[in-house]
């Protein structure tokens, strides 16, 4: 698909959240050999080095050039006040000169005490108040990193419509995010958010497209039935549904046979897309809801 920067983004990416180092290395290497051209990591996943080693190994083994791959990493909340330092450190761990996409991981600013989860004396997450620092300041610095070529595109993650609207309305915000990465699967289809982003020229990436840990969606009766109809797995139905919506699924696996099979997409008939669209009427859930004492997904809060 085309990003608003003019660059292309491969439509299925390998997710690496919860892929520990050793497993991550072989997962990424298997994925690249299987034909993936898009790998999604983040500072907080603590596997950027493994991703970088696998990418380097693959480029060496295959003779492919770096520009054929699309690598994303993300700015962590406790490093939002110095995105340049954070990105340079990520690039060093990844052993890359640039990433293809740098995302602000959350619309949350944590105090930097050299600790990824800074805590107050009472044990809660230490957040910087919105009026002292917020995602607008962070984003404005990220724009400079894009203009300097350290990343080929910038974007945001875990933002809802009011927060994107707020961000885009601020003076000095002159780069429309190329992507929004959020939790999306048939139990959380996010219809309004996807429509909104399409209108703004922001591509939507889906994390946890199979329902995250344990892939609960694979036990969903509607997906099982559709899988039987098309002769594919329920995972393939969930991934194909994301592709049919012009969104970018990022299925995570550390098992080679699953990694390979998650690249398969079938062309779903319109009536079958509608059947998957309707799944959330029976089961609706958001699976990733970190408790940092701030309102992240609420529609009224800026933070
Ligand atoms: P594993 O990494 O052990 O293969 P999501 O992409 O929604 O975050 O889902 C990730 C979860 O789904 C992980 O627990 C992953 O386990 C599992 N998984 C990924 N692909 C498949 C598949 N094709 N079939 C079954 N489980 C899968």
Image: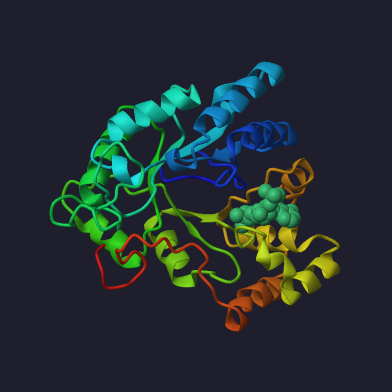
Quarter of the image where one finds residue 195: bottom left
Q: Does the rendering let one see residue 267?
A: no
| Residue furthest bottom in the image | 282
**Residue most toward the front?**
121
Residue 256 falls left or right of residue 109: right
**Can residue 4 be seen by looking at this rendering?**
yes
Q: Quadrant of residue 145?
A: top left
Position of residue 8 relative to residue 249, above or below, is: above
At which x and y percent is residue 250?
A: 59, 50
Q: Residue at x 61, y 69 (%)?
A: 186
Where residue 210 appears, as percent x and y from the top left, is: 64, 60
Up-down: is 136 above or below 95? below
In depth, the one of 2 and 34 nearer the eye is 34
The residue sitting at 37% across, 64% down in the picture is: 160
| 109 up-or-down from 229: above or below | above
Q: Is residue 13 left or right of residue 298?
A: right
Tell me which residue sits at (20%, 46%) in the image.
137
* Quarter of the image that includes the C terminus: bottom left
Residue drawn 47% across and 64% down? 194
Instruction: Return the residue nearer the eye: 299 or 37.
Output: 299
């Amino acid at each position: 698909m085309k990003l608003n920067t003019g660059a292309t983004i491969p439509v299925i990416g390998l997710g690496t959240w919860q892929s520990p180092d050793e497993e991550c290395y072989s997962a990424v290497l298997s994925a690249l050999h299987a034909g993936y051209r898009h790998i999604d990591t983040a500072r907080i996943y603590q596997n950027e080095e493994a991703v970088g080693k696998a990418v380097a190994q693959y480029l060496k083994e295959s003779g492919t050039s770096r520009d054929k791959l699309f690598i994303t990493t993300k700015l962590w909340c406790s490093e939002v006040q110095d995105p340049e330092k954070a990105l340079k450190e990520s690039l060093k761990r990844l052993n890359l000169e640039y990433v293809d996409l740098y995302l602000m991981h959350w619309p949350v600013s944590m105090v930097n005490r050299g600790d990824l989860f800074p805590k107050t004396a009472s044990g809660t997450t230490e957040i910087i108040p919105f009026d002292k620092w917020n995602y607008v300041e962070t984003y404005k610095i990220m724009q400079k990193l894009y203009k300097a070529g350290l990343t080929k595109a910038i974007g945001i993650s875990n933002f809802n419509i009011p927060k994107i609207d707020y961000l885009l309305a601020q003076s000095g915000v002159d780069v429309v995010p190329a992507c929004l990465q959020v939790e999306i699967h048939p139990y959380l289809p996010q219809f309004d958010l996807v429509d909104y982003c399409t209108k703004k020229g922001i591509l939507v990436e889906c994390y946890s497209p199979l329902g995250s840990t344990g892939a609960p969606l694979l036990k969903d009766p509607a997906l099982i039935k559709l899988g039987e109809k098309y002769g594919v797995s329920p995972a393939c139905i969930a991934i194909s549904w994301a592709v049919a919506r012009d969104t970018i699924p990022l299925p995570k696996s550390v098992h080679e046979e699953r990694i390979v099979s998650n690249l398969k997409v079938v062309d779903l008939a319109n009536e079958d897309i509608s059947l998957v669209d309707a799944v959330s009427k029976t089961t609706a859930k958001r699976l990733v809801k970190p408790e940092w004492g701030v309102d992240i997904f609420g529609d009224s809060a800026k933070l």
